[in-house]
Image (cartoon, rainbow, N blue to C red):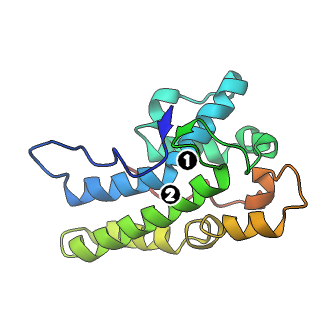
Amino acid sequence: MFTAGREGIFAKGTATRPSPIEQVAEAVMYLLNPFSVLLTDIWRKRSDLGIDLDQLDRSASHILYQLSKPTVRAEFASIDLRAEPNVTPPIRWWEYFAKSASEARALLNQDAAKYSGYLDPDTIVAIGQVRADELVYFRLPGLGELESSNRHIVPLPLSYAFGMREGYGSIGLSF
């Protein structure tokens, strides 16, 4: 069971606060958390797809690589955005994606504002690219509108919501 909220994103009770780059990496992993849960669900159905579950919690690059694989993306057609993933508290897929994207963008905005003087230019550019990415800025936060305007489509497949376009598996980040 996974946690659907912000709880646990930063280590509580530790003596040191994460570095600026670690905070940016944590915000990116927070953005990708629903995708990690999604990939875990896909792995449960199709363990032959080469998804390394240990890497899902540690590597944004691994998650993005998995999302870019056509065999993984083909599984999106079987995921109903109105279903509830294996997270607590219970939440629908579309809500989980939208909430995580909005909160991760807020975290990235805070990190960019607080640490722009400490981060190297490539990291600042990468933060800007993630914040402005169509998926992060528009598609994920807008899933509620998509869901409510398409109530006649049952089930509402994840592939329909993302349009199965190229790009969301190729955000140029490496952590």
Residue 25: x %, y % from top left: 35, 53
Tag 1: amino acid:
Pro
The residue that appears at 80% across and 50% down in the rendered structure is 157
Kind of element beneath mark 2 = helix
Q: In terms of sequence position, does the residue under pointer 2 or pointer 1 come before the other?
A: 1
In three-dimensional space, the C-alpha distance between marks 2 and 1, rounded to whole angstroms, equals 7 Å
Residue at the outermost right position: 152
Residue 93: x %, y % from top left: 65, 50
Residue 35: x %, y % from top left: 58, 46
Of residues 17 and 90, the one drawn nearer to the viewer in this rendering: 90
Q: Give the answer, above or below, for where 43 lies relative to 141.
A: above
Q: Give the answer, above or below, for where 87 lies relative to 101.
A: above
Could you tell me if the residues under marks 2 and 1 are in contact, i.e. CB atoms within 8 Å?
yes
Res 100 label: 2
Kind of element beneath mark 1 = helix
The residue that appears at 77% across and 46% down in the rendered structure is 80
Residue 48: x %, y % from top left: 70, 22
> Which residue is labeled 1 in the image?
34
The residue that appears at 77% across and 67% down in the rendered structure is 148
Q: Give the answer, above or below, for where 69 lies relative to 110.
A: above
Is disc 1 surrounded by few (<14), some (14 to 19) or many (20+) residues within 10 Å?
many
Tag 2: amino acid:
Ser
Q: How many marks?
A: 2
The residue that appears at 62% across and 58% down in the rendered structure is 168
Q: Quadrant of residue 59?
A: top left
